[in-house]
Image (tube, rainbow, N blue to C red):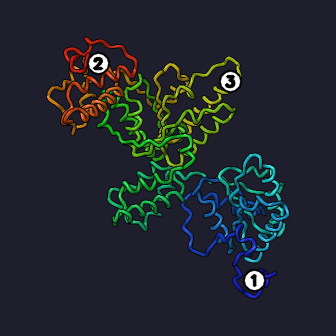
Amino acid sequence: DKRVIDFLFGRNPDKIDENFIRFMRMLTDGKELDPILANKAVLEAMEISYDQGVRIFSYCGDEGSGRKFFVKHFCKERGMKAIALNCRKLFVYDHSFVEKALWAATRECILTNAACVLEELSYREEEKEKFQGYMDLAFAKLTDKGVLVFTLSMETLQLKTITKQDFTELNIQTPSAAERTECWNYYAKPYDLGDDCDLGEMTIKFLFTPGKIKDALHHARSLATMNKEDRISRAMLFKGCNAQMSSELSKKATRVEAKFGFDDIVMNPDQRETISHAIEQMNFKNAVYDDWNYIKKYPYGRGLTVLLFGAPGTGKSMMAQVLAHELNLELYRVDVSKVVDKYVGETEKSLSMIFREAKKCNVVLFFDECDTIFAKRSDDGGSNQASANNKTALLLQEMEAYDGVCVLATNYKHNIDPAFFRRMKYIVEFQFPDVDTREMLWRTTVPKTTPLADDVDFRFIAERFEFAGGNIKNCILNAAFLAAADGDGKEVHMKHYLMAIKYEFIKVGKVFTKGDFEPYASQIGL
């Protein structure tokens, strides 16, 4: 056997057998390891189990949570190496080949004094039986020769259904605020951060694993290099964090660029005060829950939940953008059509995935027109109703467990299950704008660079035409294009706004008369 001969003669003793190198790799490289800054209890639990004779350890955790990192630390303390075995690539082969590969992996671990790390453990439901059979075979082959075995997965593998051997299952949690602070401070040391960077802000807004914190800083450094900047700015650091967003979330939700701030939306004093308080609650969440220890009395519902209700076009979607913009968080609009599924249990899976992925990057989840999945529950006894009730119950649980921001918008408040109101931190009503508000909307929505003609009378328009903010925005944009295409296109006149209003009436099916536009009716052909 060439591999054994090479080993005995000291030729590349740590080199993996070339016949199986496509499945195996040396995980440890002898480099200095960073200190353990989060989930220190995991290593302690491993040491206790190991001393008790356990030789199978199953790590479950999110991407970047430190699963390989803990393996490296554990092995280093015992003077061992670690060899990773890619099970996704290996398990596609027949039983005979897999058995040979496992024998080779066992030999490599013995020759190099290494533990075996089983990674890439995903499988489709129809492959479950085959997967579990191969896993049981792997455990038997490796442990029979005294090899220490680790499994790395995103979700629990339910090893009790696979093997009868003793094992320890360790779930690596998202680091606490204190642990995230320690991680940010440690990993940021090699980087030159600008004066506007606040690592405490990053700790609060992004519930990152240590790996994602390292990746975010590295991405921010790359942005600075591309922009020929010596230091990392706050904006670059946020972009680095936002780059860690999950692609899974994008399958069920759409990222919305939150361009609007407080100065871009017309609000009454009560609305402005309520939204300001909501933003402050997120900014000072750690101070109240952690520093003042309110978490003991309020273990659930640490996140921010806001219900926006009112007529269409009154500014609910815009307000969701304002919240995300002021908190400097990414906004994702949940596509209800992609979430609701006719098959039993699929909707619940989608909802769980959305909240799980959103939690990782602390995004704002916006459920627009949420009546479909937040509808009132019923006890009529039908199977369809029972399924709907399950969806509502799950949503309540997910929202309560979510530490981020959830914004719900509906045109019809009475359609929403009353149980949601109790879970809402803030409820904001968007009333149809009165005359003064409509005039303000017209004046503030028109860009200041617009060449307005002297004959434009926004007070007249506000008094005569009862439009919501969304309709007003449409009219303003259409009027600009009408003016640009009309004659010399130098100014936007009153007639252009009135023509845009007429088209908006036609679009929404609203009846109008010539008298509605007097004394300007003749200018628009009425």
What is the quadrant of residue 376 in the picture?
top right
* Position in image of residue 85 (x %, y %): 71, 65
Q: Earlier in the sequence, mark 3 or mark 1?
A: 1
Name the outermost residue toward the left: 454
What residue is rendered at 21% in x and 31% in y? 492
In terms of secondary structure, where does tag 3 sit? Answer: helix
Name the quarter where the N terminus is drawn. Answer: bottom right
Residue under label 1, please give it.
Answer: 7
Q: Is residue 517 above or below residue 388?
A: above
Q: Residues within 10 Å of mark 2 (few under 14, many from 20)?
A: some
In terms of secondary structure, where does tag 1 sit? Answer: helix
* Amino acid type shown at disc 1: Phe
* Position in image of residue 320 (x %, y %): 42, 35
* Position in image of residue 348 (x %, y %): 64, 35
Task: Give the Cα distance between marks 3 and 1.
Answer: 65 Å
Q: Earlier in the sequence, mark 1 or mark 2?
A: 1
Q: Is residue 455 above or below residue 515?
A: below
* Amino acid type shown at disc 3: Asn
Residue under label 3, please give it.
Answer: 384
Name the quarter where the C terminus is drawn. Answer: top left
**Mark 1 or 2, which is nearer the eye?**
2
What residue is rendered at 63% in x and 33% in y? 341
Task: Give the Cα distance between marks 1 and 2.
Answer: 88 Å
* Count of number-bearing discs: 3
Q: Is residue 344 above or below residue 382?
A: below
Q: Is residue 520 above or below residue 398?
A: above
What residue is rendered at 75% in x and 49% in y? 158
The foreground one among 334 and 493 is 493
Residue under label 2, please give it.
Answer: 465
What is the quadrant of residue 232 in the picture?
bottom left
